[in-house]
Image (cartoon, rainbow, N blue to C red):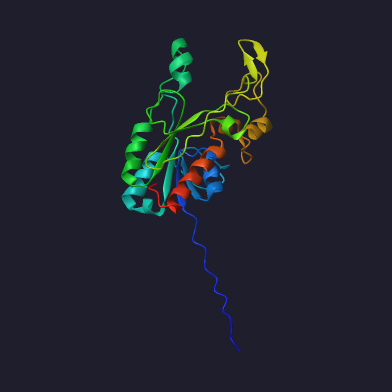
Amino acid sequence: MTQTTDIRRERAPRPLRLDLFSCAGGAAMGYARAGFRVHGCDIADRPNYPFTQHQGDALEYLTYLIDTGDIRQYTFAHASPPCQAKNTLTVGTNASRGWGGTHVDLVAPTRELLDRTGLPYVIEQPNGQAEIRKDLTLCDEMFGLGVIRHRNFEASVCTIEQPAHVPHRDRVRGYRHGKFYDGPYVAAYGNGGGKPTIPQLQAALGITWTDVREELTEAIPPAYTERIGRAFLASRTLGVAA
């Protein structure tokens, strides 16, 4: 009698991605949905972050990972360094009215350290004057979400197809100069009159694991990084440089 042996192959672990300046995990969740395990780092205590997270200065932590060789456990890195120094509001309205304080631009030192890792990486920034290449620009309307949040991505080596921009349907709902305007999008920033409720923000962004307004208003919709993560993993499967 011939015996049949059931050989079960252990599945290879999912690739591990480093999430710097991770906040509450909007970017991280998108990468997880694409097929990554995720480790984050943020200087603030983020109890709602849905994955393993190190609390501390992101650039100091990245330097530590490089110096100890622990960076080699990662396949890919994402960074969303603070961008207030050169975002549209800071250099526009706030500057003209003398509002706001001094902001630090961490994009250049972040890129320098990421280059040292030898890893493929993505740096994310909003519209404004931050000095990154706009290899990819994404907008919520491309994903049928309920906010207008353009984000630009500099990708070190991975080529990601740029989707066509979808025209915005109407205004962002809320008050402007004392007048209320209705529209299909919620204002995912600030605390003034006409701003959305927490459930409305969660629904508009596709984020359910945090109910902290500050975290929601800072977050990248997971749909953005899910697209990037899937493109990166597909490029590896096809043998494309990534």
From where the camera sits, is residue 24 visible? no
Residue at 46% x, 52% y: name it: 16
Left or right: residue 232 compared with residue 215: left
Residue at 68% x, 18% y: name it: 182
Nearest the eye: 5 or 33: 5
Identify the image quadrant of the N terminus.
bottom right
Left or right: residue 83 compared with residue 197: left
103 relative to 75, above or below:
above
Nearest the eye: 60 or 14: 14
Measured from the top left, where is residue 76 in percent x and y? 42, 47
From where the camera sits, is residue 169 visible? yes
Measured from the top left, where is residue 82 in percent x and y? 44, 31
Residue at 43% x, 17% y: name it: 91
Image-quadrant location for residue 212: top right
Image-quadrant location for residue 60: top left
Measured from the top left, where is residue 54 in percent x and y? 47, 46
92 relative to 15, above or below:
above
Left or right: residue 1 compared with residue 36: right
Residue at 49% x, 39% y: name it: 22
Measured from the top left, where is residue 38 in percent x and y? 50, 48
